[in-house]
Image (cartoon, rainbow, N blue to C red):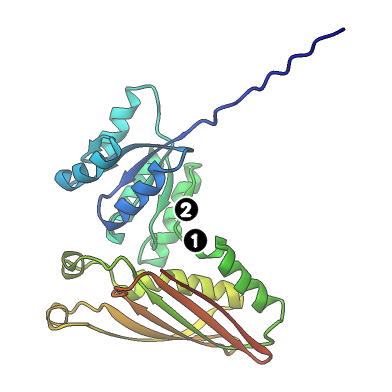
Amino acid sequence: MSTFRSTRVILRQAQARVLVVGSGRMGHIRARALYGNPRIQLCGIVDTNIEQAKSLSELYRTPVFASLEEAVSSTATTQLPLDGVVISTPTPTHESLITEAAQNNLSIFTEKPVDENAHKTSSLFQTCNNQNVNLCCGYQRRFDSSYQALFHQVNSGAIGTPLAASIFFGDHPVPSRQFLLQGGANIISDCSAHDVDFIRWVLQDEVVSVYAVGTSSDDELREKNVIDNATMLLKFSRGTNVTLTLSRGANYGYDQRCEVFGTEGMANYGYDQ
């Protein structure tokens, strides 16, 4: 009588070694997500504001570096090279950080927008392509199952010809007063980017004209010319009109809604928490 013994082999997936660049609001969000992902090893926080970076790094027991150059040099001596960086810094810093990361053969995930200038954005993607490294911008809506369901409803013809759409985006957590008063980011170029990208994809069409108006929610912001609420009207080439309302101040929770009205019906998506 033969005896068979089965052996189960468990292969451990190699972890990607990643830095977070920036220790502000988005840096906290990205660091938490990376630390909780078993496929990622969080290898450090990079920020010129060392004290702020330390407060974040202590949460995840990871080192602090004052620059990307310092981080790359430090990890090179361990014979465990880095695989990539997550850039969570203000938009004006993206160009130099992306270029430096690409030169060090690091894959890059960056907050949107890549740059406020379309020519620079194209140039940065070309730089990364030339270096054979990946550059990914954080436009996640197209990969969300709920957004995809709305896309399929519209593009299957279920609602007929799209005539109009209404989108509301209320950001949460609300940015700090310091962030807003120091300039933060232009609410129109910063907060509208996800939804403009998404609705172009849903409609399979391009914008031909834009009208936008903004307002400040209190006197202090108004004196500093800081706009924290805005409304945009987008006209698409096939005639669809899209209204996009944006706010920095959804104190009740993250709020994202979209309705597309067509000749045969309406499709919608809503998310608030």
Q: Which of 65 and 106 is in front in this view?
A: 65
The amino acid on which the numbered mark 2 sits, given as a three-letter code, is Cys
Residue 13 in percent (x, y) is at 54, 31
Crowd tier of the residue under label 1, counting other residues whose Cα lies within 10 Å: few below 14, some 14–19, many 20 or above? few
Q: Could you say whether the residue bearing mark 2 is in a helix, strand or loop? A: strand
Q: Which of 168 and 122 is in front in this view?
A: 168
Residue at left offset 23%, top offset 66%: 184
> Which residue is label 2 attached to?
136
**Residue 140: which numbered mark, if any?**
1
Is 227 drawn above or below residue 49 in the view shown? below
Is 200 drawn above or below residue 76 in the view shown? below
Q: Nearer the viewer, residue 132 or 262?
A: 262
**Which residue, as the protein is rendered here, is positioned at the far bottom?**
263
**Residue 103: which numbered mark, if any?**
none
The amino acid on which the numbered mark 1 sits, given as a three-letter code, is Gln
Residue 220 in percent (x, y) is at 12, 79
Whether residue 211 appears in this view of the structure is yes
- Image check: 144 left or right of 64? right
Instruction: Determine the image quadrant of residue 66.
Output: top left
Q: Nearer the viewer, residue 240 or 152?
A: 152
Residue at left offset 52%, top offset 71%: 198
Determine whether label 2 and label 1 are within 8 Å by CB. Answer: no
Residue 92 in percent (x, y) is at 28, 60
Instruction: Determine the image quadrant of residue 81.
Output: top left
Residue 126 in percent (x, y) is at 47, 52
Instruction: Determine the image quadrant of residue 218.
Output: bottom left
* Viewport quadrant of the N terminus: top right
Crowd tier of the residue under label 2, counting other residues whose Cα lies within 10 Å: few below 14, some 14–19, many 20 or above? some
- Cα gap from disc 2 to disc 1, whole angstroms: 10 Å
